[in-house]
Image (cartoon, grey):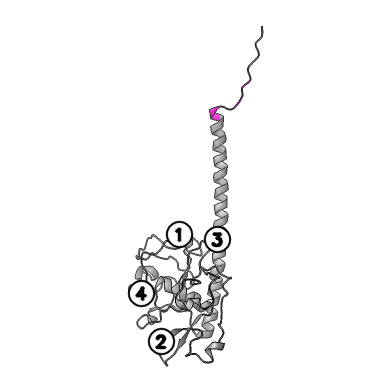
Amino acid sequence: MRHPIARRSGFTLIELLVVIGIIGLLSAITFGLFRAANSSRNKSKSRGDIQAIAMACQSYRKIYGDFPCSATGTDERFSRDLLDQLIGRRLIRTTTPGGLPTLLNFDDSSLPGDPAKRQKRSFLNLGEVNTNDNSKLGADDWKGGNPACREFVDAWGNPYDYRYRVLTPGKYLDWKSPNFLFVCAAANYVDAPSEGEILALGEYWDLAAFGGTTMLRSGIVPGTYFDENGGATGPFRADNLVNWSN
């Protein structure tokens, strides 16, 4: 009597492991492609932001004679003052012959004309570049020191870092470069351990030129942006916006 051959049902453990491995591999590839596409999109957006801000800074200088400056020189204040000047809230003006420029509100009473009728001169609209703006706040809320609408942020949501002249005696002439320094921290951003003022030797200046007489790279993109502690080898706070190599 011939016995029927039993048919196998289900999968062996090895087969299940192979299937799981294939699914995991495909998931990893898909996730990697998604991350690469998202990173490329963020970089493209941030490069566009930087070009828009750079053009706005050039337009600002044509009107007021210099790039946007900072009142005190801290990290946070540089970001705030840059935004305020490019959207027209504040402007630099020399109030005494031969004196330092002063950062004034656009409706300051010392400026020519009727402050009540004066309009902001905007060089960049608040929708062209991402900001941490709270659009629900009124137009004048910034005067009270509220944190809304204070700085430009990159596609990762981190603030752009801007450096130029500080409008205080002893610091204004310390900025040796004719250009400003603008950095996107990108995905490598970490909060600074402390508020850093300009001209930290290892932060913005060529370490070989002791005394800060030569900037490592002036303009929009520094060759390398050092950390707050002046480390020449890192950890770095920012990517190189040209090569994104850090």
Q: Where is residue 208 in the image (x, y as percent from the top left)?
A: 35, 69
Q: Earlier in the sequence, mark 3 or mark 1?
A: 3
In front: label 4 or label 1: 1
Q: Earlier in the sequence, mark 4 or mark 2?
A: 2
Q: Distance between the residues labelled 4 and 1?
A: 26 Å
Proximity of marks 3 and 1: CB atoms separated by less than 8 Å: no
The residue tagged 4 is 212
Q: Tell me which segment is drawn in magenta.
A: 6-14
Q: Earlier in the sequence, mark 4 or mark 1?
A: 1
Q: Position of residue 111 (x, y in %)?
A: 49, 90
Q: Which mark is residue 97?
A: none
Q: Where is residue 133 in the image (x, y as percent from the top left)?
A: 52, 70
Q: Distance between the residues labelled 3 and 2?
A: 39 Å
The residue tagged 3 is 42
In front: label 4 or label 3: 3
Q: Is 233 drawn above or below residue 75 in the view shown?
A: above
Find numbered disc 1 in the image and state the secondary structure of the residue it sits on: helix
Q: What residue type is labelled 1?
A: Asn
Task: Using the image as rendered, state which of residue 243 and residue 130 is in the foreground.
Answer: 130
Q: How far apart are marks 2 and 1 (CA)?
A: 36 Å
